[in-house]
Amino acid sequence: MELLGRENCTTVPSLTSNFNSHWIGKLLVVANEIAVNERKNIEDPLKTWITDATNIMEAKGVQQIEVRNRKLIWVNSNSSRPVLIAADDRCFSVFDSPQKGQEDAEYTTWLGSLFTPQGGGYTREIQAELAAWGYYLKNMTIDWAYLPRLYHSAAKASIVDASKGSMERFIDECREDFSGTITRYAPNGTQPNELGGFDREVVAAAYQTYCRTLGLTESRNGGIFTAMARAGMPERRRRDKAGARVRYFLPPDDVAGVRSIIEAAG
């Protein structure tokens, strides 16, 4: 805040309010204790505030105004899912901080030395250091090719994993161990067919049991079948012993082998 100017920075208790005139035009916006709330979607407006060239300023009783987007949003949270982040995300960088009791003693002592013991303001030494750093940043040469690149970290990977829905988690496990995953959650005694695949009904039953077992919300409307096919587990048709046509899924890593079996069988 000292570098950007306090008038250009603010801290907000929430990013879900309809009125944003007190922060939308700032350079730095700090939001505390943000977490996923199923009743209010924060990801879509966040992406708009981050990526759009302009944002809409809204104030109570005042006409909306379009303002230039020049802000950085910094979110602090103790939640394992402060926001939902997809695996191909290009908006968020995530930084982890030490847990309470794990802070580096030397670093903690250094932080305490930045402030005067009387009023809690910065010491003259750190003010001079901040001014020098600000001058350096203002005059440094920027490699613009690296500017759009995000910082990838284990902390971000953890949030990406926690952001996955039940269907995505089930698909990931099927891709890693197709037969084992479906057999584990399907009705007792279920085994793959002679081509190594599982009928649609078996896949659906396995997914439902998977969700109940792990306490996850099940996606409806048959989306699991489309997701399986898109994840590289092809859907095929065959005739059962009664002559009826049955649709089934094959493992993702055995497509070529199964096709050769089908072709050889005519």
Image: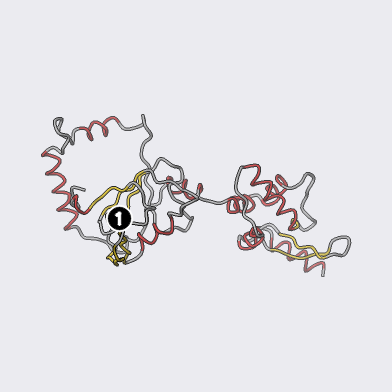
Q: Is residue 224 above or below residue 264?
A: above
Q: Quadrant of residue 154?
A: top left
User: Residue 225 at what x, y percent from top left?
Assistant: 67, 60
Q: Nearer the viewer, residue 176 or 11?
A: 11
In front here: 240 or 65? 65
Question: In the drawing, does residue 114 fall left or right of residue 235?
Answer: left
Nearest the eye: 187 or 155 = 187
Left or right side of 19 for 241: right
User: On the picture, is 194 further left or further right than 67?
Assistant: right
Q: Quadrant of the C terminus?
A: bottom right
Q: Is residue 203 above or below residue 123?
A: below
Q: Position of residue 2 (x, y in %)?
A: 18, 47
Q: Which residue is mark 1?
A: 72
Q: Is residue 241 left or right of residue 165?
A: right
Residue sitting at 80 percent across and 56 percent down? 194
Q: Secondary structure at mark 1?
A: strand
User: Quarter-wise, where is residue 263 in the image?
Assistant: bottom right
User: Picture coordinates of residue 19 (x, y %)?
Assistant: 33, 56
- Point out the residue furthest to the front here: 61
